[in-house]
């Protein structure tokens, strides 16, 4: 169980490849010789990355500028991927919202569930049969430490990432011995455009600087984990502490603690 050997016809798919961890995942895979399918909404950024990776690594990079939270657009991509030789799928696109759910914008919350959970499920369902038939393939699902425990004032995100975390680790067990494998990337704080997308600029200041990891560090560890057939990759010491405390602190304590932290996010 590891990453298949790249060929001229196989592709590695990276969603959320216009920013942050997705850009770094694409670069890490290109360095290993994978030709890519880059997915996100901002076409200009995807095209610039495709050109750069082609120049630096000599790989082919195709661009699919789509909104993955839109079922119609996503369905067309799923049909395409099901018919192609996909060696690796990095389900990475996602965003968060903070604040009380009752005052959140319902459409934005629904979009979050569609992107962080339903799209991950759909894309995985699309590529799995082909990977199993070929007896080779690697899937990465970017969950979060936020999915390890309840997240009051971050409820939709925490729930969507609980789905992603559990799906990844369940599939990892289910796929044992098939030649196909699934790895969970469950980061803590990573410096990307995440805070901006969450409309929470003070997130950057709530967590002290040394506790952040870079997108490049997270992606390097993620791809190494895919290559080694690992169940879960948690980049950085702070995220590892968050993981243990999230899983083993009694719910009656961790819920109020996180609520008081997330209430400060603006
Ligand atoms: N940064 C952190 O602290 C952190 C911690 C734990 C987990 N994560 C997870 O890591 C993943 C990557 O996030 P990041 O930190 O790299 O944040 P980011 O820099 O904001 O990147 C998010 C990516 O998702 C794409 N995306 C957002 N909405 C989309 C949509 N509707 N359709 C298609 N693509 C969409 C964005 O592209 P477009 O806007 O161009 O569509 C962008 O490429 C996410 O799943 C996030 O939840 C991040």
Image: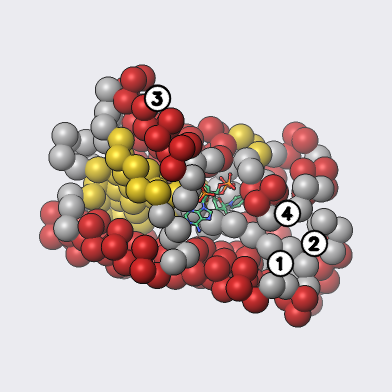
Residue 112 location, x and y as percent? Answer: 57, 66
The mark nearer the N terminus, 4 or 1, is 1
Residue 149 appears in the figure: yes
Can you say whether 123 is above or below 9 in the image? Answer: below
| Mark 2 beta carbon near ligand 1 (under 8 Å) | no
The mark that comes first in sequence, 3 or 1, is 3
Q: Earlier in the sequence, mark 4 or mark 2?
A: 4
Mark 4 to mark 3 CA distance (whole Å): 29 Å
Q: Mark 3 points at which residue?
A: 52
Of the two numbered discs 4 and 3 on the same chain, state the one appearing first in sequence. 3
Give the residue drawn at x 71%, y 67%. Answer: 154
Asked if the residue at tag 1 contacts the one at tag 2, i.e. Cβ–Cβ closer than 8 Å, the answer is: yes
Q: Circle 3: is it few (<14), some (14-19), or many (20+) Cα within 10 Å?
A: some
Element on which disc 1 rests: loop
Label 4: how many residues lie within 10 Å, few (<14), some (14-19) or many (20+)? some
Give the residue number, with chain letter if any, for mark 4. Answer: 199
The residue pinned by badge 2 equals: 262
Q: Nearer the viewer, mark 4 or mark 1?
A: 4
C-alpha span from label 4 to label 1: 13 Å
Callout 1: few (<14), some (14-19), or many (20+) C-alpha neighbours within 10 Å? many
Mark pair 4, 2: CA separation:
13 Å
Name the residue nearer the viewer: 148 or 10: 10
């Amino acid at each position: 169980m590891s990453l298949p050997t790249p060929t001229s016809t196989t592709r590695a798919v990276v969603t959320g490849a216009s920013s942050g961890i997705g850009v770094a995942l694409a670069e890490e895979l290109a360095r290993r010789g994978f030709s890519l399918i880059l997915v996100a909404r901002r076409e200009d950024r995807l095209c610039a990355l495709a050109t750069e990776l082609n120049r630096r690594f000599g790989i082919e990079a195709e661009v699919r500028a789509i909104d993955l939270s839109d079922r119609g657009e996503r369905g067309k991509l799923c049909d395409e991927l099901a018919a192609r030789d996909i060696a690796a799928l990095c389900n990475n696109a996602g965003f968060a919202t903070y604040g009380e759910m009752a005052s959140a914008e319902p459409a934005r919350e629904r979009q979050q569930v569609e992107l962080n959970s339903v799209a991950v499920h759909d894309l995985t369902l699309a590529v799995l049969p082909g990977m199993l038939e070929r007896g080779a393939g690697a899937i990465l699902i970017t969950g979060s430490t936020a999915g390890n425990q309840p997240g009051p004032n971050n409820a939709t995100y925490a729930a969507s990432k609980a789905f992603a975390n559990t799906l990844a680790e369940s599939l990892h067990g289910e796929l044992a011995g098939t030649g196909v494998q699934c790895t969970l990337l469950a980061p803590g704080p990573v410096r990307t455009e995440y805070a901006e997308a969450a409309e929470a600029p003070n997130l950057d200041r709530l967590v002290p600087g040394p506790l952040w990891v870079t997108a490049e560090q997270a992606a390097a560890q993620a791809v190494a984990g895919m290559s080694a057939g690992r169940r879960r990759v948690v980049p950085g010491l702070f995220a590892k502490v968050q993981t243990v405390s999230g899983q083993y602190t009694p719910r009656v304590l961790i819920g109020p603690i996180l609520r008081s932290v997330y209430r400060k996010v603006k």
